[in-house]
Image: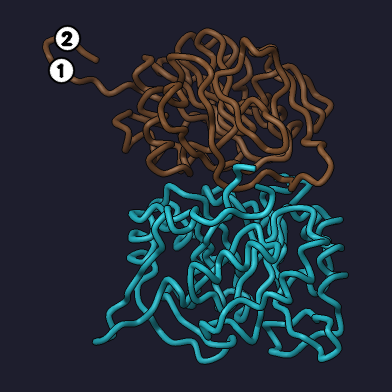
Amino acid sequence: MTLRPRLIPQLLVKDGALVKGTGFANHRYLGDPLNAIRIFNEKEVDELILTDIGATQQGSGPDLSLIEDVVGECFMPLTYGGGIRRPQDAANVLALGVEKVSVQTACLESMEVVKEIAANFGSQSIVASFDAVPDGTGAYRVFSYLTHTPTPAYLEEALLEAQDSGAGEILVTSVSREGTLRGLDLALIEGVSPIARGPLVAAGGLNSVSDFHAGVRAGATAVACGAFVLFRGRHQALLISYPERSDLDHEPWQGE
Amino acid sequence: MGVNGQFDKPKVAVIDAGLGNYVSVLNMVRVAGGKPHRARTSSEVVGADLLILPGVGAFDRGIRGLRENGLWDSIQTFRGPLLGICLGMQLLGMESEEGILPGLEMLPMRSVRFREAGLTVPHMGWNEVSPSRSPSLVGTPGEPEPRYYFAHSYHADCPAELVTGWTLHGSEFPSAVAAGNVHGVQFHPEKSHGFGLSLIKRFLELA
């Protein structure tokens, strides 16, 4: 199999600014998202995820002007998430040149929006995104970003429902690992990968290239990362780094 | 190219029929040295040196989008080099398993779903393309294989003579096709960094 595992930087924005968070709280200002995007584009990263955490919190729709600016800087695929509640939100964003829209909070209520987006734009244009927490029994529950609490929904069931509704890609984020650089939750990945029919993107805690390879061996098709590639250096300068292509491709992954 | 050493940028019409993603194509054509414009009506297609048909989404919706915008005839009768991208490539064919409407019928191919057991579908991510013809928009046989970004659940099914590039996902499938002036690529050059830029540059040189 020559389809390569992807390493996908995920940028969080709030009110048009790039922010950093740990465990979904304490978002700190990092800088101008367009600068970061320009650099990622120069580094020819595999793909980018842009998540607007303000859009969901404030109930506003996607910031189309920001997204348009971002698209203008990228010659690689973009996934946008944040405030996608209705199919029209998705249509507006996809029309700007974004490859995929990611739906998270809307999924907690119903998969209708997933079904409609898939029907209108194809499965490959919609990502169902889940934040996951262990419930102490070995199972994982879906975590609500909006209320900062676990929901009763089991991750596996929610994932299956999303796929049956047409979601082409699944993104699963470990709430406890996010922003910590403590390493991916491999048990989480191993648990969900057998039921993922399409690409599975794992996120939360990535801290090295070997951790990336471990995530792929555990069953992830791709890994999303934040703190691993984007951080604040001394004097508050924004530092961006991305592994060499040869390091990412180096290890044989499942199937070969 | 103009005479007397003057460089006239090739005029490229990029179809916008509500199928999304024409913006990135426009941007890449500009960076590649072309003069792109967005074409929403048949009058905006006329006079272009080259035509690009991007597309994302479901087959029937794509067909309807082209018909409703009056673009059908202008695409079928376009004389210059034409490039279909992703769904755009599939629309150039006869039909698709994804829909019930007939395609533009400009290429003797149909589109079928990835069916192999255990295969990850959609085929999403960076994958290699082996050029099977020289010259080819995709690259040169014998050189290191280029990589492009794919995001699709359906792929072309066509005679080998049509194929200019093969990609492995389960089995080999046609990732690039061409017949005369009509070209199609299953992947997204406008989202494939330098590889895509090289392809678009080669396409512009066809004018």
| Image mark 1: chain | B
Q: Give whichever of A229, B53 is nearer the camera.
A: A229
Count of numbered labels shown in the rendering:
2
Q: Where residue A134 sits in the image (x, y, percent)? A: 77, 86
Question: Is B93 on the left-hand or right-hand side of A213?
Answer: right
Q: Are marks 2 and 1 in contact (CB under 8 Å)?
A: yes
Q: Is residue B9 left or right of residue A99?
A: left
Q: Position of residue B195 (x, y in %)?
A: 41, 37
What colour has chain A?
cyan
Q: Name the residue nearer the viewer: B65 or B59.
A: B59
- Name the residue: 27% across, 23% down: B9
Tag shown at residue B155: none
Figure check: A153 above or below B126: below
Q: What amino acid type is highlighted by mark number 2?
A: Val
Q: Residue drawn 61% across and 13% down? A: B162
Instruction: Quadrant for residue B60, please give it.
Output: top right
Q: Circle 1: is it few (<14), some (14-19), or many (20+) Cα within 10 Å?
A: few
Find residue B199 and report its image quarter.
Answer: top left
| Side of A50 relative to B114 (left or right) | left
The chain under label 2 reads B
Q: Label 2 vs label 1: CA separation?
A: 6 Å
Judge if badges 2 and 1 mark residues of a common chain: yes
Which residue is tagged 1? Answer: B6
Which residue: 86% across, 63% down? A161
- Foreground pick, B122 / B91: B122
Q: Quadrant of the N terminus of chain A?
A: top right
The residue carrying mark 2 is B3
**Secondary structure of residue under mark 2:** loop
Residue A123: percent from the left, percent from the top?
73, 48
Chain assigned brown = B
Q: Nearer the viewer, residue A91 or A254?
A: A254
